[in-house]
Amino acid sequence: MARGDKKEDTSLLSFSETEDIVMHIFKQNPIFIYTFKQLHTHEKLHGMVSKELLDKVLDKLVSKDRLRIEVNFSYALNVPVGEIWTGIVDHVNPKFAFVVTGDAEQGDIWVKTEDLHGAIDGDKVSVRIYKPKRGNKSTDHAEAEVIEVLERKRNEFAGKIQISPRFGFVVPDGRKIHFDIFVHNDNLNGAKDGDKVVVKIIEWPQGTKNPVGIVTKVLGQAGENNTEMHAILIEFGLPSDFPEEVERAANEISTVINEEEIAKRRDFRDILTFTIDPIDAKDFDDALSFKYLPNGNYEIGVHIADVTHYITHGTVLEEEAYYRATSVYLVDRCVPMLPEKLSNDLCSLRPNEDKLTFSAVFEIDPNGNVKSEWFGRTIIHSDKRFSYEDVQEIIENQEGEYLQEINILNQLAYKLRGVRFTKGAIGFETVEVKFKLDERGKPLAVIPKIRKDAHKLIEDFMLLANRQVATFVFNKLNDGEHGPTMVYRVHDSPNIEKLESFSIFATKFGHKLDLHKGGIALNLNKFIHEIEGKPEENVLQNLAVRTMAKARYTTDEHGHFGLAFEHYSHFTSPIRRYPDMMAHRLLQHYLDGNTSAPKEEFEEKCKYSSDREKLAAEAERASIKYKQVEYMQLMEKRPFEGIVSGVTEWGIYVEMIENKCEGLIRMADMNDDFYELDAKNYRVVGRRTGREISLGDKLTVIVKSTDLEKRTIDLTLDEESVTKTSSRPISRGNAGESSKNRRSKPAKGSYGKKKKR
């Protein structure tokens, strides 16, 4: 391949730099063929590399089978036909990532970090498989390298900046970003060492190089509450402040309700009405009205703020509501979907004020049976603002304002709930936590949330309204096969294979989950009742929840498995959920006698809303985790009783019983033996002793260290607790099997498809 006598090398690039650039050129256009001249004169190489060096680089890449030679000494990326897949990067740890293909047969594809070639968590990529999948187990994975980044998930990151005399590095927040971002000193924009900043990438990494960025915003000193909460929003691509034109449009809306508008609505202002919300709630988007009927039944109105009266199609308010799609609830704040003028004023059903509402009104007999229903726009006047605590106190002490009405509502809620569970609703009650914060936002205590009758009372009437609205629309214009277009909240039946695996695991704790006699829902509820109050309850409930499908928005009606409803929508929170706004518009559309709305338009909005809801939930979890880590900083070196909540190849996750905070015992810190993952049996096994530590085992752990930037809690195993775990020796065959699964992770199908070549 020599092209004449070699001359003195005058390259400005090194061999490895040239190699990285050449491969980057090919991976940007994986189906292109380049001649030597085209490569040498390419904008990224021209004037920077000699012909001699480029010749050597190409020879090496051909010898390594990364490039192949075509006719006339042209070069092409060496990608065998049929081995290119697309998917989403899930960068699980610094050493490797998975590319989630969404293909059940192929499964997730394993990629070494150095073979990501600049792709980061969340990016859509093409990969070339160099080692096919060995079998059909979920723990078997093909191995590949990224050949092209098809779509960047994001280009802005929040992180802490570290500044030296000549340059700075931003260490991004989040556990799945495993690189620092280089920032030249002239691009710091006033940031100081230790600040939390927003950095925008202007040059993506090639090979092992760091990306290059510029600081676009200084959030404040790292560790301050407002700074960190703002950084979490940026980390998940969520907005905080409203654009000026959106605020201006909201502020221009009149607060006056004119008589012409009132005349169009059913008037509930003279009927007893009240709200029940959290004690610190700023907006009240639902209310209940109560009226005794002459026949002994009750008229119960579920009144929802009429958001779509104020927000119309084609306005900046509509565009912003759709863009946000949901309110975001961090530990110490709500980031609303709508500007404050709407969420806390016009659409907040405050006491002693006339408010415009969209209502579902039911005649219900004393046994909880719905005898008739009415849907439409209304006007109400709330008589009382209750907190959950107020109502709970009235129920428990049997004294207080509107005692009789609250008792009746509570009894009806019990009956509605009983019918729901009789029909197969699932009674999961996973533990959530709240924080007691000081004036600076520092956590003073972590407190498990307890759901009582007052919470369930409101929930049951909201569920009733959501179900009946969906059922009404589904039956309206139904042609025998399809109802009209509607935004449904669906929850598919669980994967039976996942449930069977879970059932086998549950037997290790002495619990039986029968999936074949009496129906899945009935047996799941019996199982939940059986484990109630047991040490393993939270672990088993969380694991059972993971076997369930995820609820989502769609125009295709599949019913809601978890609630045992044939038809279900979200109608009751348009202040904080865009799908509820769509449901309001569609319901009114059909009440007005119109034909079915365009399905494709609403299906696209449903998918977008589901994606945004997932992001908001991830941000909420991140804020909770941050506060848990901040709280546990005060607990370093202290022992805690805990339950094993997860096992992975890199360590054992333990949830502390006292405060529900979760930390990690790293395999590297377990000095009594060399432990290997047995993923199939949810355990790690000591190679020398055969000692097992399984999901659900009770351990004593010591808080070793905490890392606020990465939101992690490192634990060590108290030596005495090692002897308390079960020492069930296993065969060497099982131990050998566990070593083969050390890179395993459950498959998570979501995106991607095989590229046709």
Image: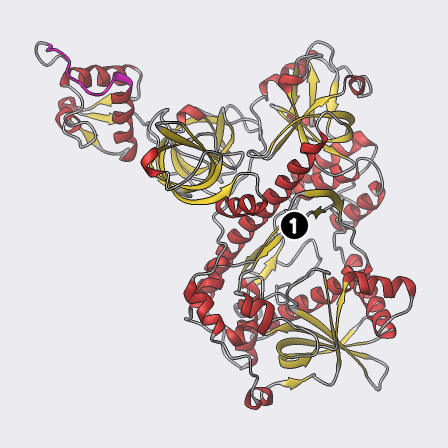
Q: Which residue occupies the foreground of this view, 173 or 581?
A: 173
Q: Which quadrant of the figure contains the N terminus?
A: top left
Few, some or many C-alpha atoms within 10 Å of disc 1 (few <14, some 14-19, many ≥20)?
some
Query: Which residue matches tag 1?
Result: 493
Residue at 19% in and 16% down: 53
Give the vertical position of 701 relative to 151 (above or below).
above
Q: Position of residue 595 (x, y in %)?
A: 49, 77
Q: Position of residue 226 (x, y in %)?
A: 56, 47
Q: Position of residue 137 (x, y in %)?
A: 58, 28
Give the vertical position of 637 relative to 290 (above or below).
above
Q: Position of residue 357 (x, y in %)?
A: 62, 77
- The colouring scheme, among rainbow, by chain, secondary structure or one colour, is secondary structure
Q: Is residue 651 left or right of residue 639?
A: left
Mark 1 lies on a secondary structure that is loop
Q: Which residue occupies the foreground of this view, 67 or 94?
A: 94
Residue at 14% in and 16% down: 10
Task: Residue 147: say if magenta.
Answer: no
Q: Is residue 77 among the parts visible in the rendering? A: no
Q: Is residue 279 left or right of residue 650?
A: right
- Quarter of the image for residue 478 reads bottom right
Q: Residue furthest left?
A: 4
- The secondary structure that dominates the magenta segment is loop
Task: Residue 12: say if magenta.
Answer: yes
Q: Is residue 205 among the parts visible in the rendering? A: yes
Badge count: 1
Residue at 78% in and 54% down: 451
Q: Which residues are magenta?
A: 6-16
Q: Which residue occupies the foreground of this view, 545 or 422?
A: 545
